Amino acid sequence: MSRKLLVGYLVAAAILAVSPFMMDAYELDVLNSVGLYALLALSLNLILGDAGLFNMGHAAFYAVGAYTAAILNTRFEIPILWALPICGLAAALFAALVARPVIHLRGDYLLIVTIGMGEIVRIALVNDVFGLTGGANGIFGIARPEIFGHRVKTPVDFFVLIWGAVAVTVFLFHRLEQSRFGRALNYLREDPVAAEGSGVNTARYKLVAFALGAGWAGMAGAIYAGKMRTISPESFNFWESVVLFLIVILGGAGSIPGVLLGSFLVVALPEMFRGFATARMLVFGLVMMVMMVVRREGLLPIRTVRFRTKDVKRAEAAPKDVKGAEVAR
Amino acid sequence: MSTILEVRNATKHFGGLTAVSDVSFDVPEGSIVGLIGPNGAGKTTTFNLITGNYKADLGTIRFQGKELVGMRTHKIVQLGIARTFQNIRLFQQLTAVENVLAGRHCRTKGGLLGAMLRTPGARREEEAAVERAISELAFVNLGDRSLELAKNLATDPKLVILDEPAGGMNEQETDDLVELIWKIQERGVTVLLIEHDMSLVMRVCEQIVVLEYGERIAAGSPSEVQNDPKVIEAYLGTEEV
């Protein structure tokens, strides 16, 4: 990671660290919302930004995670945070299952299929599938999460929980980017034929990207369920998927800092300008249009190289002859 | 010398067009073989059949005894066949090292957990991969075409397939390319190439296969092929009677 980016993160972390002391409950709640969207958008960024797979049904995976958490909690009294890995796994499994037959589709076709998938999930929830989801009213009475016996209930508590999760996600996803896995996703996005021709199992990596992104969204869904205590199908409608898609594209596809900035702008700005009522959506729409004309790569298209520069420096310091037996074997 | 690649009766139709018709040839291990022919003779299609980009309708293609027809491209790369494309295919937005690292993918194992936790094993593997990528870049060093070749060599290939490697090169660059092809052969790698630059083909290839209209019309050493009346006809046309 470049020093500039590190400084940027530290400044952002410092601002966030003091914000609970400067903000009222409402403002903090908005910031918590930003954090949740950041988690979701970062997970979508793996699929859409890194692997280049157009997914406009991400809310479905979010929903699977949230409902899994809600059902486990209300029916089996499993604490939300204990249920977290199960929710991630459920969403990942669901994604792998539904994506398997359609993953070979290209860009626009995949987009349409994922929109359909998102809607089917929402309608299934409204219709109370398996008698578990509570229909249009959803599920209520979800217990608040607990960390080491401390009940998470105030906006400040949730602020720590959500932004802690964002920090962990950013850390892990940066590492993931800078690895064999992260590179494989990028090869896939740049040129699938050349990727396959370089020895990358493109079908498998597309599926893994989908499952991992979905799994992360599922975990975000569990946190959401614990925060709201009531969830209903309307929280996971098509617009949610669109907003997440927007965050990734406007922020800068494939750029973690871009996606974080995008989450803030798309979620927090409309809240700040609530006073202007409907005019704010007009401005929001205009901004999106202008952005796509003048700055298609997004607000912060920071690309970190997908290897550790340290390794390159070491290799260049000690050039080795490749003609040796090691190569010929 | 044993045969590393064996193409038997390979046939590929596209609708009513037969792009490759009943083509057979052998590539001896460690040799440099050229595939030549006029435009549209089916050379690149033949390459695509070998590398799994297309599936042969008929015939068999065996690499070290293993049947390749029906196998997916990345599996074929894993077996040890790497190819370059006629119109260079690079990952445009990525850096040179990232491009070459693509070739190391099939020889490394690092997964999700290793990457997130940055385990010592994953770290060592990354170091070795980057080191190899850098040294392949130094080995090739051929301007525009370097990256794709370096990437291919990074896959530990036993056979490299080059589709018009000298396309757009001047004389000096072509000479460098000839040197490089010999250097690749010295590493114990077999080379199969398509090329229109006959001086390069005659200089570097030990055996030549000639295609016309999707069919093999001649095969043999450069001198045999050069004196073959069918080849002369294909390249120069027949005399009007």
Image (cartoon, rainbow, N blue to C red):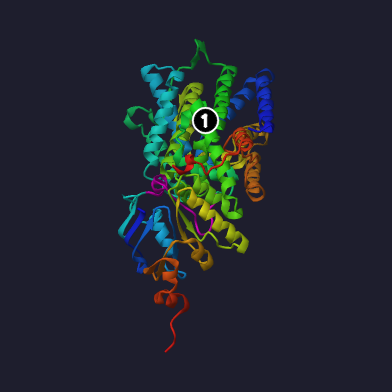
Residue sitting nearer the eye, A304 or B104: B104
Count of picture labels: 1
- Residue drawn at point x = 36 percent, y = 54 percent: B1
Residue sitting nearer the eye, A185 or B124: B124
Above or below residue A46? Residue A113 is: below
Above or below residue A58? Residue B239 is: below
Q: Residues within 10 Å of mark 1 (few under 14, many from 20)?
A: few
Residue B156 seen in the figure: yes
Spot occupied by residue A267 in the image (x, y as percentages of width and height): 60, 33
- Determine the secondary structure under disc 1: helix
Q: Amino acid at mark 1?
A: Arg
- Residue drawn at point x = 47 percent, y = 28 percent: B113
Spot occupied by residue B50 in the image (x, y as percentages of width and height): 39, 55
Residue range (magenta):
B72-90
Residue sitting nearer the eye, A297 or B5: B5
Spot occupied by residue A254 in the image (x, y as percentages of width and height): 57, 40
Residue B119 seen in the figure: no
- Residue drawn at point x = 49 percent, y = 39 percent: A47
Please say whether residue B74 is one of the residues in the magenta stretch: yes
| In the displayed structure image, the side of residue B194 where residue B49 appears, left or right | left
Disc 1: which residue: B124
Spot occupied by residue A8 in the image (x, y as percentages of width and height): 68, 30
Please say whether residue A168 is one of the residues in the magenta stretch: no
Disc 1: host chain: B
Q: Quadrant of the C terminus of chain B?
A: bottom left
Residue A124, quarter of the rendered image: top left
